[in-house]
Amino acid sequence: MLIDNVKITIKSGDGGNGCVSFRREKYVPKGGPNGGDGGNGGDVIFKADNSLSTLIDFKYRRIYKAQNGKHGMGGDKTGRNGEDIIILVPCGSIIKDASSGEVLADLTENGETFTAAKGGKGGRGNSHFATSTNQAPRNAEPGKKGEEKEIEIELKLIADVGLVGLPNSGKSTLISKISAAKPKIADYPFTTLQPNLGIVKYKDFQSFVVADIPGLIEGAHKGKGLGIRFLKHIERTKVLVFLIDSTLASEKENKTEDYDTLVNELKSYDKKLLDKPRIICLSKIDALTDEQKKPLNKIKFKEGKTKEEKSKEKIPVLKISSLSGENLNKLNDEIWMLLNQ
């Protein structure tokens, strides 16, 4: 199960109190103050870990506390600092302040860290308060309280390629054929209920990651279907592959209707998505006769881009079959070429 949005409570450690103490040794009946300082409280740190792919662990634990600092002791002994708590999150996690919605950090690289709450500072012992007029101070500082925050964690998957299409357009079958991913596949809409990631091996020692998101429908940017929840997962992709069911396109008078719907949904959600290089794939081509394939050769897809972007290379259009494997190698070649541009 992919859990991509959670809210948790974090609290850094309190600082330890300073100590009130006086030096007491043989033949030194009135030694000076020697109360030690309190230790600092532990921090709350988020760390990106590429071995994780979901936020499911946060479903079972919602409160995270760092250790408090130890109190100071006599003999000028400083209390031990509290241990930090390190919270592991998947790469691609966005850390937000739950109350204001402010983005505090975007952890995309493995091992990248962010300190979300600093531990409280330890209080000073009474040795710091000795003066010429007060040589035996009996006061010390209490430790500072740690920070407590409500944090929202939002996960946006990191993939090189995003598969976009209407329900039942063949995205899950495609990712299962070009990668080792094993998504649920069935001949009905909305079979895919959550994003799937697949690693595609290319040539001998190269690879790229493909994300398959649930099918979009008209009005997805307004919350219809499942699209609005998962559109965020293609924001980080470098290339978009549009899958158009050729069996449906061949029957419609407007052959580009499905493609236009997808472009409009992406544009309504975030115009920047259309700045990405894209490939159009007419899927399920094995189900068509030669006569049915002819009209597809004349389809002209609108780029849906600005005038400046239209001057770039035209969008590649491929006719593919995931079942027979037709043009799948060519699709991988096109993806690799665009990734390396």
Image (tube, helix red, strand yellow):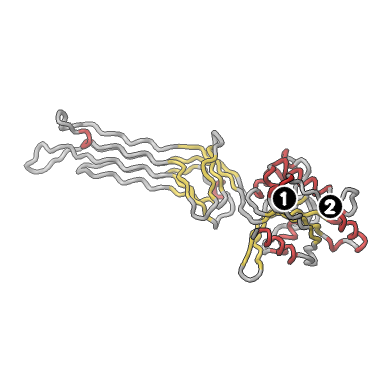
Residue 251, x across and y down, in percent: 90, 52
Q: Which residue is mark 2?
A: 300
Q: Residue furthest left?
A: 27
Residue 236 visible, this orientation: yes
- The tally of labels here is 2
Q: Which residue is mark 1?
A: 214
Residue 223, x across and y down, in percent: 72, 39
Label 1, label 2: how far apart the Cα atoms are: 26 Å
Residue 185, image quadrant: bottom right
Residue 222, x across and y down, in percent: 73, 38
Q: Estimate how packed mark 1 is, as few (under 14), some (14 to 19) or many (20 or more) residues with alpha carbons within 10 Å.
A: many
Of 338 and 19, nearer the camera is 338
Residue 315, image quadrant: bottom right
Q: Amino acid at mark 1?
A: Pro
Of 63 and 230, nearer the camera is 230
Q: Which quadrant holds the C terminus?
A: bottom right
